[in-house]
Amino acid sequence: MKHRLMFTGKKLIRMVLLLLGVSLAAFLLMSASPLDPLQTNVGQAALGTMSQEQIAKLEDYWGVNTPPVERYLGWLGDFIRGDMGTSLLYRQPVSTVIGQRLQSSLWLMAFAWVISGVLGLTLGVIAGARRGKLADKLIRGYCWLISSTPAFWLALVLLVIFSVWLGLFPIGLSVPIGADAASVTLSDRLYHAFLPALTLSITGVANIAMHTREKMADIMESDYVLFAKARGESTRSIVLRHGLRNVALPAITLQFASISEIFGGSVLVEQVFSYPGLGQAAVNAGLGSDLPLLLGITVVSAAIVFGGNLIADLLYGVVDPKIRRGVARK
Amino acid sequence: MQPILEVKDLSISFTQYGRGTKQVLLPVIQDLSLTIAPGQVVAVVGSSGSGKSLLAHGILGILPYNSHMAGEITFLGQPLTPQRAAAVRGKEIVLVPQGVTYLDPLMKVGPQIRKGRRDQAAKAASRAVLERYGLGTDTEERYPFELSGGMARRVLIATAAAATPKLVIADEPTPGLDARSAKRVLSHFRELADGGAGVLLITHDLELALTISHRVAVFYAGETVEEANAADFTAGKLRHPYTRALWNALPQNGFVPIPGAQPGPGQVGEGCPFAPRCPKGRPECLGPVPYRALDGGLVRCLYPEGGERP
Ligand code: SF4
């Protein structure tokens, strides 16, 4: 137990360092951005009609005159005190914006995460267990096709087929247009999240299936599977009793590592579907020089990805008898 | 008495891709023959990496898909077809593999012995069989990585004995064990034979094999070159020059090394494979060499030792 606590403690320290690094990197990139916040957000024409005083005020608002070091330290100081600042674009506290956006995105990502995990694992196990057979060839073909297809392009194709031609799903947004927030039902949300989530799942499946297939194929060539065969176990029993058990550990790692990919994919997919999620907000914040929002989103998503890996490590300790028993013996 | 296992002219080869897309047939075992009677331990002795394990896999019908097997295998008087092999393996024919890597690393020993059965009878049986090999009931709760080398071998034997088999195939069951544990492990195979089963012991260790075997088949470059009674060795009644050389290479018999190296699969031409290393070789040895009976054993040599004997 003590060992496990130490382990978690070390991980948390690493997480703090990581978040610090990630926020700094995001800040530096933004500072180096050639986009002028005034021109992009106010517009060239509007700026021309303004007085020097007004422009100075705007420059203060967008933080143009504050030295970068001071700006970053100011943000960091507030952040440590629990204040993520106010979004310059949305004129709301960053925490509120992220909270709302995360809620919509979470639907999408959770759906895609579960579907791609379950489907990817199943397909990978089947392909690995039947390596070289027809099922394997079909699954591999699918995976290659999908991995060489950019997510945004797939999103566009799905959008064209299902929304434009067939009219089965909405073209965008997370709720019906013009609907009152109170009248939005769960089915409305699912209906709107379906296509983006499908896109994310389809791309996520390929990666998980291919990696699982490799592991499963290794397992099927292992000494212990040969011995199980020699003991008269059927292929079915071998896959269920030995295959799944041994593929579980790498699958956990894969599954939690895929969080970051789903996060990355959601940025593009949300853009295509005009889905008001975290990814879309990140793009807006980046292009609109909304520093507090961008840093907020960066830190929150890094924390989620890191949290996923942490959960994977902790689960590993529970599932892998070598770690579990090793700890018990000490 | 009806033999338990009869192998006649067994050949196993692999399809390999040579240069480009050309397929080559790589012979690993050629014209291997042996017979095992009930209560008998028959050792197949050959140097490591000579493809002996494939004999075990061939009998069990678990060769990889790119392999071909020809010849006759008879088990209890009936041909051992692939279907029959699938039906009897793990029950009437069992394998005792080399080491701990043949156990599922993430499954406890108990469930592995029980092959997924959970009923009380199965539990009692697995406990009994572990006890038989001097392993406590706590062994059931261990994972393979928690077993010592000797324990792992005994667990593997327990998996075999749990099935009350008619034929036990032991594939190199002793490497990595100290002399005492190795003897102990081997004595368990002798016990199984004394109980009426046939035991096929595949090993590179002639000295250990002789401690428990009744008959020894010597394997060289994919062929059995001699089949002899274990007693023939100490009596100096060996037939094939390679067997003689193996015997002389043992520490207590002078430690005489055999010059040259064994040809690998695909490197064997016409004629006797031992010819390049044989002190008695003659030009005729490059022609066909039949496997023939001699003096209570079998030999594949044109000029066997003792062949001059009346
Ligand atoms: S056949 Fe000739 S070469 Fe081969 S072992 Fe006998 S004597 Fe030697």
Image (spheres, coloured by chain):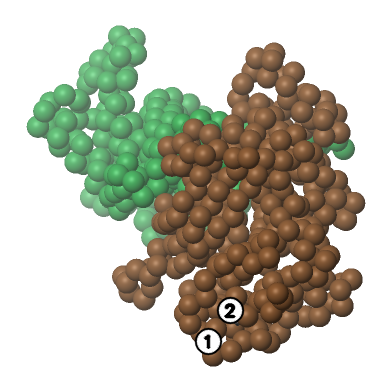
Chain colours: A green, B brown
Which residue shows up at 60% across the image and 59% down it?
B52
Callout 1 amino acid: Glu
Above-or-below relation of B253 to A295: below
Secondary structure of residue under mark 1: helix
Callout 2 amino acid: Leu
Q: Is residue B142 left or right of residue A110?
A: right
Secondary structure of residue under mark 2: loop
Q: Which mark is on residue B284?
A: 1
| Front one among A111 and A320 | A320
| Res. A227 in view | no
Categorize mark 1 by other alpha carbons within 10 Å: few (<14), some (14-19), many (20+). Answer: few
**Which chain is disc 1 placed on?**
B
Cβ of mark 1 under 8 A from ligand 1: yes
Which residue is outermost to the bottom? B283
Cβ of mark 2 under 8 A from ligand 1: yes
Above-or-below relation of B121 to A244: above
Q: Which residue is mark 2?
A: B302
Q: How many angstroms separate mark 1 from mark 2 (CA)?
A: 8 Å
Q: Is residue A217 left or right of residue A189?
A: right
| Front one among B170 and A202 | B170
Q: Quadrant of residue B92?
A: top right
CB-based contact (under 8 Å), mark 1 and mark 2: yes
Looking at marks 1 and 2 on the same chain, the residue that comes earlier in the sequence is marked by 1
Which residue shows up at 36% across the image and 76% down it?
B19
Q: Quadrant of residue A330?
A: top right
Q: Position of residue B98 (x, y in %)?
A: 69, 50
Q: Position of residue B50 (x, y in %)?
A: 60, 66
Do discs 1 and 2 share a chain?
A: yes
